Amino acid sequence: MTDKQNQGHVPRVHRKVRSGEDFDIIIGFLGFWALVLLVVTVWMEVTAQPALGWALGLLATLLAIYGMVRLRRRLPGRTATRRR
């Protein structure tokens, strides 16, 4: 054993390559909630209940998806491969 402890330095070859995998997960999560909010908003409109809050939530979710897709385009593709 050495007396020298790891000072937080990670060699360049062991650093995680930034890829779009995390963005894909977030986009999928936001897409699911956008679909839920769309269904709720349509249901509220059809049943003549106030739907403004639901519609604004849907708008915010769609804008978040748009922003994430734009950021995702700048990152490299998936780094992991499937094992057979």
Image (spheres, helix red, strand yellow):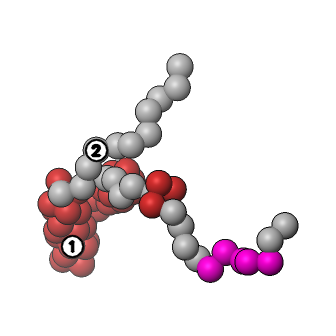
Marks 1 and 2 sit apart, C-alpha to C-alpha, by 26 Å
- The mark found on residue 23 in the picture is none
Looking at the image, which is closer to me, 73 or 6?
6
Q: Main secondary structure of the magenta part?
A: loop
Quadrant where the image shows the N terminus: bottom right
Looking at the image, which is closer to me, 3 or 82?
3
Instruction: Tell me if residue 5 is in the magenta stretch.
Output: yes
Crowd band around label 2 with a 10 angstrom C-alpha radius: few (<14), some (14–19), many (20+): few
* Amino acid marked by disc 2: Gly
Residue 12 x %, y %: 45, 60
Residue at mark 1: 60
Rendering quarter of residue 53? bottom left
Q: Secondary structure at mark 2?
A: loop
* Amino acid marked by disc 1: Ala
Residue 68 x %, y %: 23, 62
Seen at 44% across and 39% down, the residue is: 80
Residue at mark 2: 77
Instruction: Tell me if residue 57 is in the magenta stretch.
Output: no
Residue 42 x %, y %: 21, 58
Looking at the image, which is closer to me, 79 or 25?
79
Highlighted range, magenta: 3-7
In the image, farthest residue toward the top = 84
Rendering quarter of residue 79? top left
Seen at 17% across and 53% down, the residue is: 73
Q: Is residue 46 visible?
A: no
Residue 82 x %, y %: 47, 29
